[in-house]
Every structure is written in structure tokens, then in C-alpha cells.
Amino acid sequence: MLTINDKAPDFSAETADGKKITLSEFKNKKNVMLFFFSKAFSFVCSNQVCRFRDAYEELSGYDCEIIGISFDSMDTQHEFKTTHRLPYHIISDPDKKISGAYGVMRFGGYLPFVKRVTFVIDKSGIIRNVIHHEFNIGRHTLEVKKTLVALAESSI
């Protein structure tokens, strides 16, 4: 798995809204919170995405773009985003290239879901925090906020 101070691998993907995005389009413009979730509509993942939804305004106030990724199909991602009224990007990684580049696959990709990991990437494309906790979902939101505050104060 990638660690703090690693360069974030670029990727290109289609969002659940049908928009094409790349990580590099945010370089020198926005910080990025890139989070991987295991399975759309599962209890813990639904809790996770809704916590991020509820913190969206605060997090985006720190020039932060939020992107969620799982192996779920594009149709499932679209339904998941709509059902939970998610204001941020959700993308599908069916070929597991993004998950592989970030090192979040379980047992080399043999299991059909990823580790629950959140990366905070600064405007220059460097990973400034890695939060990996499977069940303490609140920890992800708290750690992201702390990192974004530190970035805003230029202490990282």
C-alpha cells in the first residue's frame, strides 16, 4: 500500500454521473480525498459514504475534491450515489487498475473487494495521510479534517 510522502498515481475514470475525470486535473488546484470502499449498499460502506456526504461542505471548504472508488459496476455506483445523495465523485474500478496502483486490494485481488483506505493527496500530488481502518469509520473523517487543516496552515 502507498504511504505518506509517496506520489499519488494518476488515473482516468468515468464517474457515476458519466463524467470523465483524471487525478491530474486537480493538480495545483485542489487537494484530493481519495477513498476506497468495499461494497456499495453494505452497512459499513453506506455509513462511510454518508459520513463523508455530511462532512462534504466542511471538507470542500479546504479546497478538497472527494472521490470514492470500489469494484462495483457503474450502474451500481450510480444507484448508490443517487440513493445516498452523494455530492462527490464515485467511480468504478472493474479492472482493478486504480486499486492495484494504490495497493488496496485484498490478497492480491483474489477477494472481490478492497481494503477500506482513505488517501489525502495535496495539490502537488503527494500523499499526506493514509487512513486504514475497516470499522472505525469516524476515524477516516476526523483524520482527513486534521490533515486538510494542516495543509491549509502549511504545516505539512
Image: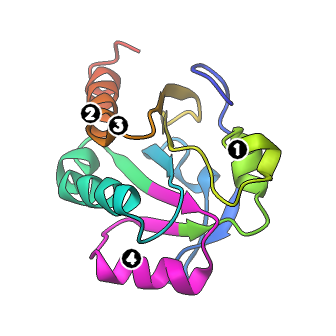
Q: How many other residues sit within 10 Å of disc 4, few (<14), some (14-19) or many (≥20)?
A: many
Q: Residue at 55% across / 59% down in the picture?
A: 69
Q: Which residue is mark 3?
A: 140
- State the CA–CA distance, disc 2 to disc 4: 22 Å
Where's residue 84, x and y in %?
Answer: 29, 74
Q: Which residue is mark 1?
A: 106
Q: Quadrant of the N terminus?
A: top right
Report the magenta residues as a range.
Answer: 67-90
Pointer 2 with pointer 4, Cβ within 8 A: no
Q: Which residue is mark 2?
A: 145
| Identity, as a three-letter code, of the amino acid under mark 2 | Lys
Tell which residue pokes out farthest to the top in this image. 155
Q: Residue at 35% across / 25% down in the picture?
A: 151
Numbered-mark total? 4
Is 28 on the left-hand or right-hand side of 58?
A: right
Q: Residue at 60% across / 72% down in the picture?
A: 72
Where's residue 99, x and y in %?
Answer: 69, 50
